Image (cartoon, rainbow, N blue to C red):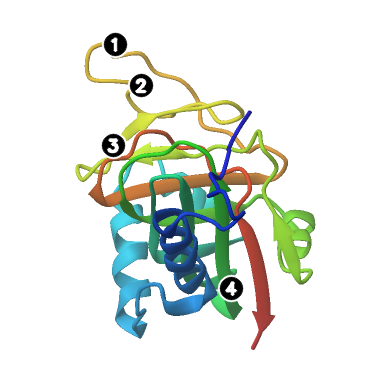
Amino acid sequence: MMYDIDTNKGGKMKPVKLLLLTMCAFFIAGNGFPVFAGDFDHTISVFRKSPAVQPFFDSAYGYAVFPTVGKGGIVVGGAYGKGRVYRQGEITGEVTMSKVSVGFQLGGQAFSEIIFFQDKRAYDEFTSGSFEFDASMSAVVITAGAQAKAGTEGITAGASAGPSTGTQATIGYTKGLAVFVHTKGGLMYEAAIGGQKFDFTPL
């Protein structure tokens, strides 16, 4: 069973669990991290420096970039981020990302995320209004050195698969999307992004 919210004899939620739920709700509601105009240029620059990511800027139909996504929790977790969507170099709208998860989890994370759209179909699907990654969707993590650190199901790492293996593979799209994240703080235990929900607002 994924979760079990304890109750007292009176059927009321324990104060600690209630506090966690409340904090998560406020975070997801939009408090998150402030995002400034220069943050987008800086984040794009960081991703461009990665040999694994660079080819996507040259060939993708468009992309969505989130300078800071905050994720954290112990029993009830959440993630939230504000981003922009680009098509062939031009900003076409703003997008918010949110995710709520219930179950054992530990640690907080702050990371940047970029989503490349292989073609117009993928772009149109993402910007149709509301879009959600399915459970199988995962991302490639790049380190501060801009090297691909981990490839997960559906996307294969195109740089070193790890410092000890030295193996190489080819990065590809999954369902028209390729996703990379760059850790900004905290511990990145895994690169699963399934369940992320996106709401797009055109300019």
Tell me which label, 3 or 4, sits earlier in the chain: 4
Give the number of the mark in front: 1 or 4.
4
Tell me, yes or no, whether the two marked residues, 2 and 4, touch with CB atoms within 8 Å.
no
Q: Quadrant of residue 2?
A: top right
Identify which residue is drawn at 47% across, 54% down: 14
What whole-number distance in Å separates the C-alpha atoms at marks 3 and 2? 9 Å
Mark 3 vs 1: CB contact within 8 A:
no
Q: Amino acid at mark 1?
A: Thr
Q: Mark 3 vs mark 1: which is more N-terminal?
A: 3
Q: In the rendering, at what x and y percent does residue 24 appear?
A: 46, 63
Who comes first in sequence, dot 3 or dot 2?
Answer: 3
Looking at the image, do the residues carrying marks 2 and 1 touch, with CB atoms under 8 Å apart? yes
Q: Which residue is mark 2?
A: 161
The mark closer to the camera, 3 or 4, is 4
Q: Earlier in the sequence, mark 1 or mark 4?
A: 4
- How many angstroms separate mark 1 from mark 4 (CA)? 37 Å
Give the structural element (helix, strand or loop) at label 2: loop
Tag 3: amino acid: Gln
Q: Using residue 201 as the reference point, say whether residue 100 is left or right of it.
A: left
Instruction: Work out whether mark 2 precedes mark 4 in sequence or the reverse, and give the earlier one.
Output: 4
Q: Using the numbered discs, state the Cα–Cα distance from disc 2 to disc 1 in whole angstroms.
A: 7 Å
Q: Gap in Å between the C-alphas at discs 3 and 4?
A: 27 Å
Q: Which mark is residue 95?
A: 4
Distance of mark 2 from mark 4, alpha carbons? 31 Å
Residue at left 51%, top 68%? 25
Disc 1 element: loop
Callout 2 amino acid = Ala
Residue with the mark numbered 3: 147
Q: Secondary structure at mark 3?
A: loop
Residue at the spot of label 1: 165
